[in-house]
Image (tube, grey):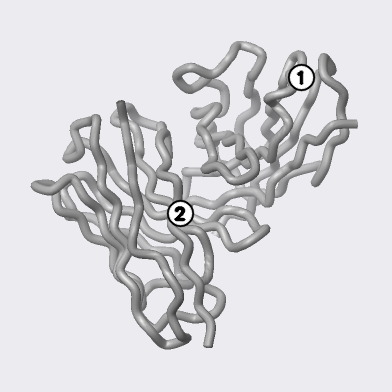
């Protein structure tokens, strides 16, 4: 069974840092692109970062580029999101998602999400 | 950035009714479109990818159509478990972008 479990969320002050992690199991982790998708309270969805199965390609949405860093450890079946210089508008539930191996399949599995609150 | 626009924002429907949700892209995206369902307090779930292919385990009452800039998600006969928010997403050009969602609630 595919499982994605996020952790690392919490309360942080504006300007602070947080590192989110996602533990994956139940599939061949190093065959899949992985992503972080966030959802502000009561709002829609935003894909903020994506990483290739071997870690050689990374993409970021403009609003987080230069502040967030996505990485993965294929030996430990985990993906991470280092978030620096956090802003109030970064507050959201952050979901770890998996892309399918077959072309055209995105976000076929989601974790339960971890809440990030940015407030003074 | 490609903007995805969903309509309507809310649909009030009764069980058993046929439901049609619309999604429009600000530029052509071929068939690089997915639909997701999200229930309160839950993560989204992939329903449709490639504009018209049902994901694993998705009931046949869900169908998707369209290409280019205009897309539709149809639920042939609404079940109680289908009341939720539905999002479309394009994956033609990074950043992948979502529509703002259509909420299907009980009339």
Residue highlighted by disc 2: A37
Q: Is residue A106 visible?
A: no
Q: Residue at x 47, y 67 (%)?
A: A116
Checking the image for residue A1, the label placed there is none
User: In the figure, is residue A40 to the left or right of A62?
Assistant: right
Residue nearest the viewer, comparing B90 with B69: B90
Residue density around tag 1, few if under 14, some if 14–19, many if 20 or more, within 10 Å:
some
Residue nearest the viewer, comparing B14 with A57: B14
Q: Secondary structure at mark 2?
A: strand
Q: Residue furthest right?
A: B107
Residue A98 percent location from the top left of the image: 35, 40
Residue A15 percent location from the top left of the image: 42, 87
Q: Residue furthest top?
A: B60
Q: Is residue B5 visible?
A: yes
User: In the figure, is residue B78 to the left or right of A12?
Assistant: right
What chain does badge 1 belong to? Answer: B
Q: Residue at x 46, y 50 (%)?
A: B93
Q: Which quarter of the picture shows residue A100?
A: top left
What chain does badge 2 belong to? Answer: A
Residue B1 percent location from the top left of the image: 54, 60
Callout count:
2
Residue B6 percent location from the top left of the image: 73, 44
User: In the figure, is residue B103 to the left or right of B57?
Assistant: right
Residue nearest the viewer, comparing B37 with B72: B37
Q: Residue at x 24, y 48 (%)?
A: A52
- In this rendering, the answer to whether B29 lies above or below A73 is above
- In this rendering, the answer to whether B39 lies above or below A47 is above
Q: Secondary structure at mark 1?
A: loop
Q: Which quarter of the picture shows residue A26?
A: top left
Residue highlighted by disc 1: B78
Distance from disc 1 to disc 2, alpha carbons, whole Å, reads 28 Å
The quadrant of the image that shows the N terminus of chain A is top left
């Amino acid at each position: 069974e595919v499982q994605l479990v996020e952790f690392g969320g919490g309360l942080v002050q504006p300007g602070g840092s947080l590192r989110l992690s996602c533990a994956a199991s139940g599939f061949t982790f190093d065959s899949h692109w992985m992503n972080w998708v966030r959802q502000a309270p009561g709002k829609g969805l935003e894909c903020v970062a994506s990483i290739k199965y071997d870690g050689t390609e990374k993409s970021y949405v403009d609003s987080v580029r230069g502040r967030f860093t996505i990485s993965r450890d294929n030996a430990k079946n985990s993906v991470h999101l280092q978030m620096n210089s956090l802003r109030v508008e970064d507050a959201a539930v952050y979901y770890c998602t998996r892309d399918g191996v077959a072309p055209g399949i995105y976000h076929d599995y989601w974790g339960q999400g971890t809440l990030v609150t940015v407030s003074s | 950035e490609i903007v995805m626009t969903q309509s309507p924002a809310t649909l009030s429907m009764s069980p058993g009714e046929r439901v049609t949700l619309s999604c429009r892209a600000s530029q052509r995206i071929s068939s690089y479109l997915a639909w997701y369902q999200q229930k309160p307090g839950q993560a989204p779930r992939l329903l449709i990818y490639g504009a018209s292919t049902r994901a694993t385990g998705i009931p046949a009452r869900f169908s998707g159509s369209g290409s280019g800039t205009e897309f539709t998600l149809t639920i042939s006969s609404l079940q109680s478990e289908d009341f939720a928010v539905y999002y479309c997403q394009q994956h033609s050009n990074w950043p992948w972008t979502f529509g703002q969602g259509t909420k299907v609630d009980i009339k």
